[in-house]
Image (cartoon, rainbow, N blue to C red):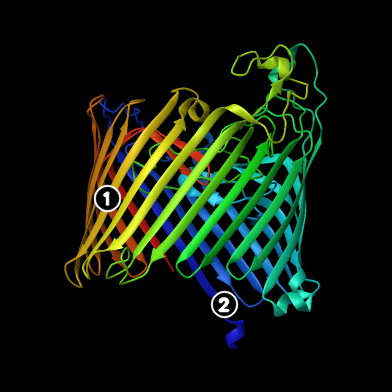
Amino acid sequence: MAQDDKITLSGSIQSDILLPEEDNKIKTDKYKDDVLTNTFVDLNLNSRYVDAGARLEYLEHPLPGFEKDYAGWGVPYMYLKVKLKDVDVTVGNFYEQFGSGFILRTYEERSLGVDNSLLGGRIVAKPFKGVTMKALSGRQRRYWDLNKPWITGGDVELGLDEWIRPLQSTGTYITLGASYVMKHESSEYRPAPEKFYRLNLPENVEAYDFRVRLQKGGLNVLAEYARKSQDPSADNHYIYRKGSVAMLSASYSKKGVSMLLQAKRSDNMSFRSERSITGTSSFINHLPAFTMDHTYALAALYPYATKPDGEWAYQAELGYNFKKNTLLGGKYGTKVKANFSYIRALDKNYRAGYTEGSDKVSVLNGTDGYGSAFWKWGNERYYQDFNVQVEKKMSKSFKLNLMYMNQFYNKTAVEGKGGMIHSNIFIADGKYRFNNMFTLRGEAQYLTTADDERDWAFGLLELSVLPHFMITVSDMYNVGVTDIHYYQGYVTYTAGAHRLQIGYGRTRAGYNCSGGVCRFIPATKGFTVSYNYNF
């Protein structure tokens, strides 16, 4: 066969296994199964004109913390894609995102148990220079079933720089985008609050998105606005207020300097494929959190989950590299980054008879629910995070990272109870390279607070033995309240595309978050095995 006509096979295997043990001290669940596993096998065939793929998922006995309907096994994802000169056509399961995802983002995030792919058809066309058009229709996956409503939408992006020569000559890129999504859901389903009256539920819920992006050199500016028609649901207590989200984001970077400024206002923008569903599944859209995704254990102890019912969110970041052989740069240079996030409630004027936080939500059903001035903040602060990181190479063999973080976390707003938690977090992360084979990395972290479970300490040692092994031990300890140690130990073996990790230890109950979407993970203890293979 000609080189362009060859068929290639690619894929991956991911299997995470827990042999659970009960531990009354950390309050683990009681398990019926001796082995729990989340296993995925992806296969993809690629050629010049046609791609095809499928995924086998074995989740019959899933890891702890996933919703009940997550359990099962089968092949829930299959697709066939035909690629022509200016048109791609996909039938089967697919993921898609319009703009920033305010009205449509389907994606997979296995650590959260999120897979909201669509089953149907999609066309992506580039009929003219600088024009990209998309059209799709399908039903959304919810674990091992499909939600009944149909999701239909379209998107168009125009690259003005492709048409206007002066923009090209000055290195200026301007992209205009517009999107439309409609959910068609039968009005036959009637929510429980209707025992005394009948709601007139809309069968078609429409959403629109408009955006403009400017790029010139290191400057990138994005302005985006989305609006959703009346969408009474379990998330908003079946009110008829329209939803909206507005965002302005600007970033700038050049050698040694980076800056980011973002602001977002969202109001009643929960958008699911079925109005009665709650929890983490069936979202059609996605609202980014505008908070830093922390990787250090104690910095991520209190992560923020986006509130789709409404919030003002701000984020600012400044990074600067001090050059080598300067006063602050020293012999090897110094990198400094500061990040600030602030999330605030909207100002909401509820209709007479309703008090925010009360259980008498039925007074909202069938009404607009509340009014809200666009620029006005509410009284409640949801989240605040200021952190500074310093990355410094001390010698040819030793590298040091330092971080300080000041955080306000409204546990009541995010989790339902717990009040405001104000904490200060100190982190030191050092890496020493002995030779070409051995590298030792260590972390020392301390979180201090007068709230919740008070202070936490965390320590980690990680020895890399090239080319195959990594040995990791860690302990997270609650100081003075529970005095519980959450110890863990892992041995990781890597060979080519294979990665095998075996471990044992405890995991604290808490939230695992990514991009403002969170899943509660109960406390666990036991042996873990993780295997990954990509080909």
Q: Residue at x 51, y 30 (%)?
A: 414
In the foreground, 59 or 201: 201
Task: Check the picture and name the quadrant holding the C terminus.
Answer: bottom left
Q: For numbered disc 1, what is the local secondary structure?
A: strand
Q: Which mark is residue 7?
A: 2
Residue 353 appears left or right of 7: right
Say which quarter of the image contains residue 488: top left
- Label whose residue precedes the other's in the sequence (2 or 1): 2
Q: Which residue is mark 1?
A: 428
- Residue kind at label 1, given as amino acid type: Ala
Residue 364 appears left or right of 483: right
One can see residue 16 in this view: yes
Q: CA distance from mark 2 to mark 1?
A: 49 Å
Which x, y percent locates residue 237? 68, 24
Q: Mark 1 Cα within 10 Å, few/some/many (few <14, many 20+)?
A: some
Q: For numbered disc 2, what is the local secondary structure?
A: loop
Which x, y percent locates residue 317? 49, 52
- Residue kind at label 2, given as amino acid type: Ile
In the displayed orientation, state which residue is furthest to the left.
Answer: 434
